[in-house]
Amino acid sequence: MLQLIPMGAKRKEAEALAIPVCEDQAIHINKAVAAAAEQAKKLSEFKGKKGDFVVLYDLKDLKAKRTLFCGVGKMEDLEPETFRAMAGRAVKEGIKMGISELLLAVPDPKDVVVNRLPLLEAMAEGACLANHLFDSYKKEKKLKILKKIRFMVNPNGTKEQRGLLRRVETVCRGTLLARDWVSMPPNDKRPEQFSKLIAAEARKASLKVSVLDETRLKQRKMEALLAVAAGSRSKPRLVVLEYGSRYAKKTVAFVGKGVTFDSGGINLKPSGSLEDMKSDMSGAAAVAAAMIAIAGLKPKIRVIGAIPIVENMPSGSATRPGDIVKSFEGKTIEIGNTDAEGRLILVDAMSYIIKRYKPRALIDLATLTGACIIALGEKIAGVFSPDDGLAGAIVASGIKTHERCWRLPLPEDYKSLLKSEFADIKNISETRWGGAITAALFMAEFVRDTRWAHIDIAGPAYIKKENEYCSAGGTGFGVRLLCDLLEEL
Ligand code: BES
Ligand code: ZN
Ligand code: ZN
């Protein structure tokens, strides 16, 4: 779907050409493109400011029916995210126009020397991610995604550039798959169904798939995980995806929280908080989709993806506050609150993966706490790790991919907040303050000396209002992050 074409190539007229326009400098080498950008800037409503947008028709030196000018602001402020947003905007406008192909003019990197930006990569990501609609639940499909997006590069596309586009497409397809799963209504992705959806996609990607059902989970004594599922008529699953050979130099593992609907259980959530709880499986979606993307990227390591899937519901068979369960690791847990369920399914999945695969690094992704959204807002994920190197690598990948992460502490003296009178540990803190931290500290008690990081994605996993390259609903946050991170683990 993504293609390169050389600048100035003889071609038939394009339906639309999008040109990024810088406010204070010329960034295009191609004369016709540069001249068109200058012409557009003569309009009073278009100055090339970030977010400026105008369409002109049948410009004489350009072989395009429509030319979309997208302002990117001043040269010194340019960053990759500007170009993701610009390309995403152009694709979304193209979809609204009802066209099927879009051409994007990529500025010559030599012209954007000040910031040395990976422009083609950023534009390809923005374009690919914006070219998506979640309309399978609509009777009338009013819009259609673009069939082809082409990037005009100067002078000729290189082999590296073609490889780059393929990589971007593989990874972004993963993001789109995760978005679809997150946006899917909870009546269609109950644990038995969701585990089948994941298994089917994973098999297509040639991953090794194993699914532990309720009987197996009981045999393996994963009581913490089972306790969360107890109130639902849909039975729990633990899906394990494997990529690469057991003889590979290193094994890394990802674990994703898969609560297909979080009602809170007996500690039922109030109305306003129930609305978007179909998204409580965003960690699972990101891990599964990242594994599928990784199968396409073919790195020379072994990667394990573990996905515990449950539905958290109140009923006569539901777990009660006050219940005590024994985790897979052996510690007993007093359930102080049935709405703090994510940490329960995660610790059993993580202990199982640690015991079975002994990974060199383990990272979990989870929509774990409202407290993390209070701390960092809706666009930034919280990172917790006792390992400075691992936390640093995650933050760095977050900057590169713009899936932003900020490290929060794991203070030793907060551990006492999780004390239980009756069991080894309690699943909630005695205070509501610092809830994202105490949730992470709870999990830290189960991983012991494994190199581990926890990423709380409760904020960025889901958006109510569309942005430049994502519609309202699941964002697929984490897929690009994990794919990028893989090289650093
Ligand atoms: N799934 C929620 C966290 C969440 C909240 C995700 C808002 C996305 C948006 C989680 O299971 C939960 O309910 N956490 C509780 C923990 C508390 C009971 C200790 C919370 O954050 O209030
Ligand atoms: Zn909950
Ligand atoms: Zn939850």
Image (cartoon, helix red, strand yellow):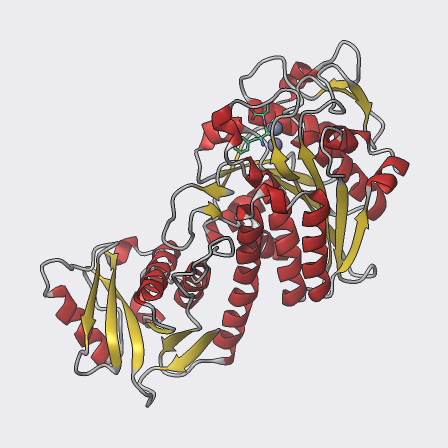
> Front-most of 123 and 102?
102
> Front-most of 365 and 218?
218
Judged from this view, the residue extending furthest toward the front is 139
Q: Residue at x 47, y 54 (%)?
A: 138
Is residue 83 placed above or below 342 in the rendered structure?
A: below
Is residue 50 placed above or below 266 in the rendered structure?
A: below
Residue 387 lies, in percent from the top left, at 65, 38
Residue 141 visible in the snapshot? yes
Judged from this view, the residue extending furthest toward the right is 219
Residue 253 visible in the snapshot? no
Is residue 242 placed above or below 353 in the rendered structure?
A: below
Residue 279 lies, in percent from the top left, at 55, 40
Judged from this view, the residue extending furthest toward the bottom is 10
Residue 392 lies, in percent from the top left, at 56, 43
Res 3 → quadrant: bottom left
* Residue 480 left/right relative to 229: left
Q: Residue at x 76, y 44 (%)?
A: 238
